[in-house]
Structures are given as structure tokens and as C-alpha cells.
Amino acid sequence: MNSIAKLANKIELKANNDIPPFNFDSVVEFIRSAFAQSLAIYVFGSRLNATAHANSDLDLAVLVAGYADPIQLWDISNLLVDHVGCSVDLLDMRAASTVMQYQILQTGYRLWGKEPDAGLFECFVASEKIALNSARADLLNDIQTQGYVYGR
């Protein structure tokens, strides 16, 4: 069983029975054909963490060489609706904040990736998150000690 089939089984087990399973193979192929410079495709969000309901969207991220065109992301997400039967939120992994990138990598699932590019990007994100945590450690500790964020 390939990794996409395992993921589909995982989603079927966690999702509400009213939510049909997705054909992730066709989603990956569709995104890869739309973005010729694709390096990785990720799925994340409520469809993976058992909080999805019938109106939940499908959260996807694409990593491309450089940055994806926002209009193209919007167009492709609208076209994907016909493939998956629900709203689709497709974002540019590289354009996302470090925190968002890290959250996708930690809680999401890579549907497809071109190596070594995808792995190198994921290592870069982990390094950036460590640097960010280090840079804001004193601030976060102060917030936790003081008990408030605003009015400082």
C-alpha cells in the first residue's frame, strides 16, 4: 500500500462518516500538472485531526521553486473543488510564516515530494523555527510569568 493510500485510510478512520474519502492520487497529479516546478504537496488541518465536519475545507500546501502565483493558487483551489467535493484552501508553503510552515510539517502529511529539495526545505523550516523560538524565548517566558500579553 503506497503512502497516499495509507493516508486515505487514516482520514477515513478519523473523519465523520458523512464525509466522503478523497482520491489523493488525483489531487497530487492535478497540483503537479498545474505547478510544473512543484517540489512538495502537503495536506493538513481538520481533515487530518478528526475535527472535520461536512462543511470543512481541505487544507493543502504546495512547495514550488520560488513562489507560487496567488491568482494561480486561487484558480487551482477552485478547480480542485470538483475533484474532492468540498472547498479547498491551497497555500504557497514558501510564502507562509515560519510558524505556519512548521505547523504544517508537524501536524500535516506530505502527499508527495521531490527529493532532496523537499527534505532540505523541511530541514530549513525546522532550523528557522528553532531560531525563532530562541529569539523570542525571553518574551514568551515573561508573558508566561506575568500572565498577560498586552499593556506591557
Image (spheres, rainbow, N blue to C red):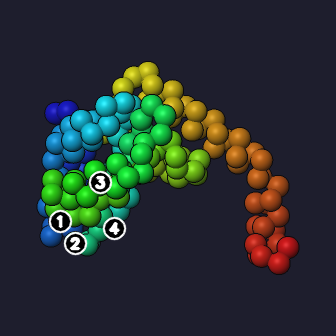
The answer to whether residue 122 is left or right of residue 38 is right
Q: CA distance from mark 4 to mark 2?
A: 10 Å
Q: Quadrant of the C terminus?
A: bottom right
Inspect the image, locate mark 1, and give the three-letter code of the amino acid beneath it.
Answer: Ile
Q: Which residue is mark 2?
A: 54
Q: Are marks 2 and 1 in contact (CB under 8 Å)?
A: yes
Front residue of 31/106: it is 31
- For mark 2, give the secondary structure: loop
Considering only order in the chain, which callout, 4 or 1, is on the residue closer to the N terminus?
1
Instruction: Look at the numbered disc 4 and give the secondary structure of its residue.
Output: loop
Question: Residue 98 placed where, x, y %?
Answer: 59, 47
Q: Report crowding for label 3: few under 14, some 14 to 19, many 20 or more residues within 10 A (C-alpha).
A: few
Q: Amino acid at mark 4?
A: Thr
| Furthest residue in direction bottom, as rendered | 151
* Disc 4: which residue: 51
- Which residue is at the front of the view, 89 or 7? 89
Dot 3: what SS? helix
